Image: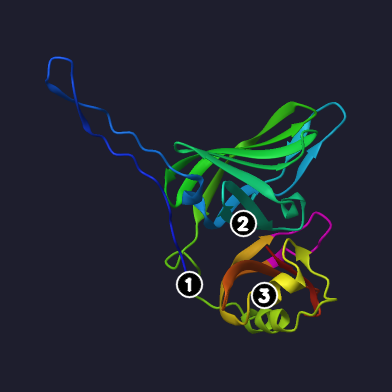
Amino acid sequence: MRHALHGAFVLGFFAATANGATAQVPEEVRIESSAIDGIWSIDTPSEISIDLAQSAHFGPMAKRFCRVETTGRNTVIRCVAPDFYLLEGTAQVDGNKVHLAWGSALARYVIDATLDNPFHMTGTFAAKVMGIKHDAPEISTAEKLHSTTAPTDNAPNEDLIARALQQVSGDTKLNGNVSPNELHALGTVQAVVFLGKTARSPTENKPYFYSVYQVEFSSGERLCGLHQVDSGTLDALICV
């Protein structure tokens, strides 16, 4: 699997003072947005509700699996989830501060976090409705997944999602940001790694909604999830 970390680091240097002596300039660390590219497990509220009196309720924290990608100057975040995270979000990095955002000016969801190290960040989830901000009471943490953090046990549905992806046709209904044509352009499935399960949808009785996989194709990589009804029948397929 390809796991690349890109960053720009500006190291401290010695500068001459006015009298010719040298003084050490404090070390400055600058991180480009592409430094957070990759697959992340992010803890966010499982449910969010805000009533007409602007009273907010947040459910317990639950894992979301998201893919961050930089193209040119734009960094976006796309998540496998049955709720608003299906919207494409934006990601910005300023120093070691990370700002993730989904939605519009009227209803916006954000995470303001500190990048503790290249593979972990900690911050606050908030909902902004009509300009009023509501912070979730629990801390939001995120972990970048790589070969040493991915689960070592295989999920029983790895073969199922591989077959489903190979059988995608032009009229296949897909959730997420990737169309059937885009999947075909990625080529054949080379490897599938089970990452975990998302929190359930508020309308679902099952304890989870999507089983999530990191899928490597011959010409790229995507984050995909599948949903099954109680009988085991594949009910939904999503790739981001």
Residue 143 x/y as whole percent: 50, 53
Q: Secondary structure at mark 2?
A: strand
Label 1 is placed on what type of residue?
Met
Q: Nearer the viewer, residue 202 or 124?
A: 124
Please give the name of the residue rendered at 60% of the width and 47% of the height, measured from the top-left corner.
74
Structural crowding at the residue carrying mark 2, measured as other residues with C-alpha within 10 Å and reported as few (<14), some (14–19) or many (≥20):
many
Q: Quadrant of the C terminus?
A: bottom right
Q: Residue 197 sits in which quadrant?
A: bottom right
How far apart in space, not on screen, are marks 2 and 3 (Cα)? 21 Å
Residue where numbered disc 3 is placed: 185
Instruction: Decide which of 2, 196 is in the foreground and name it.
Output: 2
Q: Main secondary structure of the magenta part?
A: loop
Please provide the residue range marked out in magenta.
199-210
Question: Can see residue 226?
Answer: no
Q: Which residue is mark 1?
A: 1
- Badge 3 crowding class, 10 Å Cα cut-off, few under 14, some 14 to 19, many 20 or more, is few
Of callouts 2 and 3, the N-terminal one: 2
Q: Is residue 5 above or below residue 239?
A: above
| Secondary element at tag 3 | helix
Q: Is residue 206 magenta?
A: yes
Q: Could you tell me the amino acid type at mark 2? A: Cys
Query: Does residue 29 appear to the left or right of 68 in the view shown?
Result: left
Q: Position of residue 94 (x, y in %)?
A: 49, 36
The residue that label 2 is drawn on is 66
Which residue is depicted at the point 79% across and 69% down?
A: 174
